[in-house]
């Protein structure tokens, strides 16, 4: 298992550690940089520093990027007309906010409408401060 994962989350980008609560926000430029780097290259120094600041017990200095970080597929996030998985409104503009996983049925794209995205952002904000 990778130690870290970088992913788009709601309208931001985050660095998360499986099994660890919370995460670190990634500026979009850093997120794009991680996506563009060769996985066989060492983790960039700024990443190692950000990781150690967030998780003092984890040091990825000089480790291969592909060994420590799972990067998302290149998915361009666009508003599409569809069905909101949260409020079940149909034929509304929705945005992919991430995969949703079912133990029985696998993965599905979790799309939400703008009011639901705003509510999820408020919940994430509250979660990060508890
Ligand atoms: Zn909704």
Image (tube, rainbow, N blue to C red):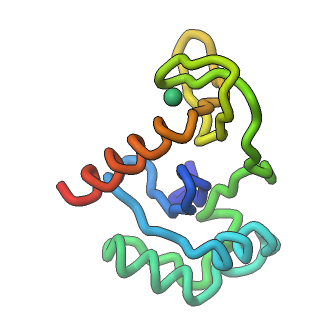
Q: Where in the figure is residue 30, as x and y percent of width and height?
A: 64, 78
> Eyeballing the image, is 16 above or below 104?
below
Front residue of this view, candidates 29 and 47: 29
Residue at 61 percent across and 55 percent down: it is 8
> Eyeballing the image, is 79 above or below 9?
above
Front residue of this view, candidates 20 and 10: 10
For the C terminus, which image quadrant? bottom left
Q: Which picture quadrant has residue 69?
A: bottom right
Q: Which picture quadrant has residue 97?
A: top right
Q: Where in the figure is residue 81, as x and y percent of width and height?
A: 74, 29
Q: Where in the figure is residue 88, as x and y percent of width and height?
A: 53, 17
Q: Is residue 12 found left or right of 119 in the rendered image?
A: right
Q: Residue furthest left?
A: 130
Residue at 68 percent across and 34 percent down: it is 93
Q: Residue furthest top?
A: 104
Front residue of this view, candidates 97 and 41: 97
Q: Where in the figure is residue 110, as x and y percent of width and height?
A: 60, 30
């Amino acid at each position: 298992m990778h130690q870290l994962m970088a992913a788009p989350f709601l309208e931001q980008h985050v660095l998360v550690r499986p099994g660890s609560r919370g995460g670190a926000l990634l500026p979009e430029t850093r997120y794009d940089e991680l996506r563009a780097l060769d996985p066989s290259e060492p983790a960039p120094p700024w990443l190692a520093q950000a990781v150690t600041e967030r998780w003092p017990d984890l040091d990825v200095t000089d480790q291969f990027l592909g060994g420590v970080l799972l990067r998302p597929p290149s998915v361009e996030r666009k508003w599409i007309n569809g069905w909101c998985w949260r409020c079940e409104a149909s034929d509304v503009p929705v945005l992919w906010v991430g995969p949703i996983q079912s133990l029985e049925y696998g993965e599905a794209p979790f799309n939400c409408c703008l009011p639901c995205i705003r509510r999820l952002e408020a919940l994430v904000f509250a979660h990060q401060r508890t």
